[in-house]
Amino acid sequence: MSGFELESRLAADSVFIADGPLSQVRLMDDTRFPWLLLVPRVPGAAEWIDLDGSQQRLLLAELNRVSQLLRAEPGVEKLNIGALGNIVRQLHVHLVGRHAGDAAWPGPVWGSGPMQRFEADALQARAALWRSRLG
């Protein structure tokens, strides 16, 4: 969408997977969790209510699709879905696969210690796997 720019912290902490009808799908660069982001390509959007009705429906459909794929990941017992925006104001939705005993269980993934970044080759391989799943 014209005028869309990805916030620099999102760009630094994640890698592009694909463009959906409304959102960029991105993989968080943290090996501790299966963790994806949806970033609506809507300039200036900071909150869900900044999207019009058709955009909200598109984002919900994208959330449903990506959540189904994430839930199928080995070891995922629970999905955490959140759009906080307290640090990065640009509207983005986190989808995190969780399981009892993971690095942050049962608390939130935010603030649970430093990210454990993928090796460059592993990050690209993981992104390619998600690209193939999203078809």
Image: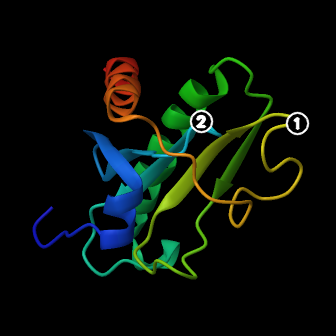
How far across and how far down the image is residue 94, in percent?
Answer: 56, 54
Q: Residue at x 71, y 49 (%)?
A: 80
Residue 55 lies, with reference to residue 124, above or below; the image says below
Comparing 19 with 121, the one in front is: 121
Q: Residue at x 64, y 44 (%)?
A: 96
The image's mark for residue 101 is 1
Q: Which residue is mark 2?
A: 34
Residue type pointed to by label 1: Gly
Asked whether residue 37 is in view, the answer is: yes
Secondary structure type for disc 1: loop
Quarter holding the N terminus is bottom left
User: How many other residues sit within 10 Å of disc 2, few (<14), some (14-19) or many (≥20)?
Assistant: many
- First along the sequence among labels 2 and 1: 2
Quarter holding the C terminus is top left
Secondary structure type for disc 2: loop
Question: Is 3 left or right of 112, judged from the image as shown?
Answer: left
How far across and how far down the image is residue 31, in percent?
Answer: 57, 38
Q: Residue at x 61, y 72 (%)?
A: 84
Residue type pointed to by label 2: Pro
Comparing 104 with 18, the one in front is: 104
How far across and how far down the image is residue 38, in percent?
Answer: 43, 52
Residue furthest to the left: 2
Mark whose residue sits in front, 2 or 1: 1
Q: Residue at x 68, y 17 (%)?
A: 74
Question: Is 67 left or right of 124, judged from the image as shown?
Answer: right
Comparing 40 with 35, the one in front is: 35
Q: Assess whether mark 1 and mark 2 are in contact (beta carbons under 8 angstroms).
A: no
Residue 30 lies, with reference to residue 91, above or below; the image says above
Structural distance between the alpha carbons of marks 2 and 1: 14 Å
Residue 17 lies, with reference to residue 50, above or below; the image says above
